[in-house]
Amino acid sequence: MTVDKKALGKWLREIREILNREWDPISGCPEDEYESYARKIAAMVRDGTTDEQLLKYLEHAEVENMGLSHPFDVDRGNRVVAALRAVSLPLQSA
């Protein structure tokens, strides 16, 4: 099976846009600031990660990777996860 590269690129852009619009814990960063997180999250979604695991990853990214202080905004995290779930996975073809 192969993945439509154009669809995959669109999907990754949508994930990045969600992170920039809904998550953005640093606030006001360049468009590609969360690129590495977008790729990790895309892989997690593709692999069937639970909402709880996605939420934990967002918290880890903020607190451990970015060094932002607690408390993690769980409501914002849940909005991000819901938005990520609303984006359709790119289809694979035979």
Image: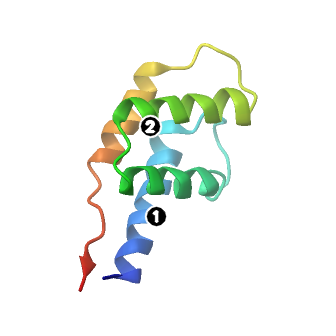
Q: Which sits in the foreground, 1 or 90?
A: 1
Provide residue 36's location: percent of width, then percent of height.
63, 55
Query: If the image is split into quadrants, where does the C terminus sit?
Result: bottom left
Q: Is residue 90 above or below residue 63?
A: below
Would you say 93 lies left or right of 84 here?
A: left
> What kind of residue is marked 2?
Leu
Q: Earlier in the sequence, mark 2 or mark 1?
A: 1
Provide residue 3's location: percent of width, then percent of height.
35, 79
The disc at residue 54 is: 2
Query: If the image is split into quadrants, where does the N terminus sit?
Result: bottom left
Q: Which sits in the foreground, 22 or 78?
A: 78
Dots 2, 1 in contact, CB < 8 A: no
Q: Mark 2 to mark 1: distance in Å?
A: 18 Å
Q: Identify which residue is drawn at 45% across, 39% down.
A: 22
Q: Which sits in the foreground, 1 or 82?
A: 1
Q: Identify which residue is drawn at 57% across, 28% down.
A: 59
